Amino acid sequence: MKFQGTELYLPQGEYTVVCWANASAENSKLGGFQTGKTIADLFVEHPQAQTSQEIPTLDRLLFATASLSVNERNAGMETEVKFSTKTIRMSVLLKGISLQPKIRMDGLASALHPVKDNDTGEWKVLPVEQGKTYVPSVEYDGTKKEAVAVIDVPRFGADTPALIELKDNAGNHIVPPISIADLIRKYNIQIGDENEIVIPIEITFTNGHAKITIKDWENQNVKPGGV
């Protein structure tokens, strides 16, 4: 087997290949590859997850598996892998804000664990709760009075308990905590398993009031390698 110039010679037999796309060293740590571990021990988490209660984001991860048969007859066989998305992207845009905000998200899984269903033979990627808080970096433009943050998180259901909090430097809430489940219901956002999803939350501040809306949310086909 050859990948990016590296050749791996495998004994004859049947193999399962597990693939992650879009995983970066900055936001994704692949675990479970130590001696004595098996494919059942594989997981992905943020590199800070073992040492910090707070993490900034995961990557926009795609997952695939493939069966590989190694023998003398098919030494040159190519195998196609079909990726599916395992994260949801949350983007938060603040308009008319006159200070550098802090954004926090609680109630979400922060790791992913692939598991094989022994009855069907299919692979599923399960979200893993670690009790972490997402604290993404926030780009703030004081001239335009705009701030934006992007967070990639494990996929969640429509009944997620996740909350978004906007705070000032003193730790005070700029607006009350925002329920993701309420936004999903209000805007009829379809959370499925087959498409990449981006939920763009826009909060506009005018005359002491805050208006929270979801711009045209994206539900699109998977694009392996796309960020």
Image: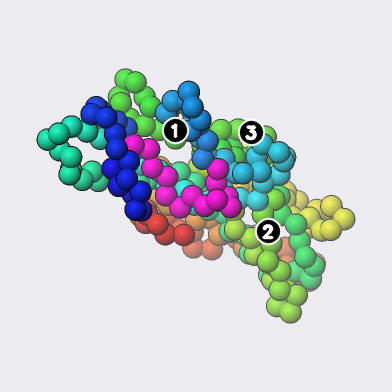
Please tell me which of labels 2 and 3 falls first in the chain. 3
Q: Is residue 132 magenta?
A: no
Please tell me which of labels 2 and 1 falls first in the chain. 1
Q: Amino acid at mark 2?
A: Ser
Distance of label 2 from label 1 (alpha carbons): 28 Å
Which label number is shown at residue 114?
Answer: 1
Q: Are marks 2 and 1 in contact (CB under 8 Å)?
A: no
- Residue 163 screen position, x and y as percent: 67, 45
Does the rendering let one see residue 64?
A: yes
As drawn, 151 above or below 98: above
Q: Nearer the viewer, residue 184 or 87?
A: 87
Please tell me which of labels 1 and 3 falls first in the chain. 1
Q: Residues within 10 Å of mark 1 (few under 14, many from 20)?
A: many
At 49% from the left and 27% from the top, the residue drawn is 35
Q: Decide if residue 61 is on the left or right side of residue 79.
A: right
At 38% from the left and 42% from the top, the residue drawn is 19
Q: Residues within 10 Å of mark 3 (few under 14, many from 20)?
A: some
Which label number is shown at residue 130?
Answer: 3
Q: Amino acid at mark 3?
A: Gln
- SS at mark 1 in the image: strand
As drawn, 138 above or below 158: below
- Residue 118 screen position, x and y as percent: 34, 21
Magenta-colored span: 17-29
Does the rendering let one see residue 211?
A: no
Circle 2 residue: 137
